[in-house]
Image (cartoon, rainbow, N blue to C red):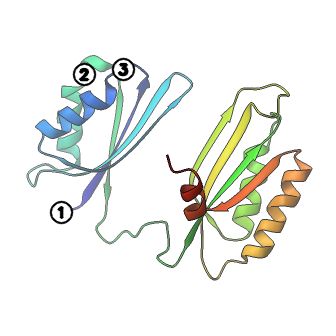
Amino acid sequence: MNKLIITILGKDRPGIIATVSASLFHLECNIENVNQMILQNKFAGFFVVEPHRDLDKDGLKKQLAEALKETNLRIHVDTINKNTSTTEPADSELFLITTIGPDQKGLVAGITEVIARFNVNVINLKAMFKGGDDPNSNIMSYEVAITRENDKTNLFSALRKRARELNLDISIQHKNIFQTINKI
C-alpha cells in the first residue's frame, strides 16, 4: 500500500500535534515521519503515514477533516508512491551551512542560487528573520546533501564569496561534526 503525506495548516495553538496524532491513531494509521514548525503564528505540520488497509487517500482526508472540524485546520492529503526514493542520495554527506547577518531582501535567494548552481540539494532550510541591522538577529540554516559528484571545494568557496557580498557571516560544517560538537 502507498504511504500518504498529510499537510496540516492553521493558526498555532497548544495541542495541534496531540489532536492530529490521536485522530490518526483512531483511524488506525501508523505515523512514520513528522515534521512541524511554527512560522510566525501559523502552524505547519507534515505527517507521513501508512494508512489502514481499508483507507485510501480520499477516505482518510474525509475522516480526518471530520475528526478535526472544530479546529479550523486546513488539511491536504497526497500519495507517496512506494517507488519514490528520498531526495537524499545514498552516497551523500550532509553539511550544515549557517549564515548570520543583517536582514535584507534576497538573502535566501542569494545563498540557494549558489547551492543550486553546484547541483546540491537543500534537505532542510530554516530562516529566522527578526529584521533590523543587528547581525545576530537574522539566522539562516541550510542542511544540504553533497555527493561525490559535487565539487565541494568550489561550492564552499562560492558560498563564502556570496556571503561576503551579502554581508553575512557563514559557517559550513559536516553534520556529524556539528552533532558531535553540540551534544548535550
Query: What's the mark number on residue 69?
Result: 2
Q: Quadrant of residue 168?
A: top right
Residues at marks 3 and 2, CA–CA distance in whole angstroms: 17 Å
Q: Residue furthest toward the bottom?
A: 149
Nearest the viewer among 132 and 71 is 132
> Mark 2 is on which residue type?
Lys
Residues at marks 3 and 1, CA–CA distance in whole angstroms: 33 Å
Left or right: where does residue 109 sit relative to residue 182? right
Residue matched to label 1:
1
Q: Nearer the viewer, mark 3 or mark 1?
A: 3
Question: Where in the figure is residue 149, as x and y percent of width and height?
Answer: 64, 82
Q: Residue furthest toward the front?
A: 184
Residue matched to label 3:
14
Q: Quadrant of residue 129?
A: top right
Q: Is residue 173 above or below residue 72?
A: below
Query: Which SS class for mark 1?
Result: loop
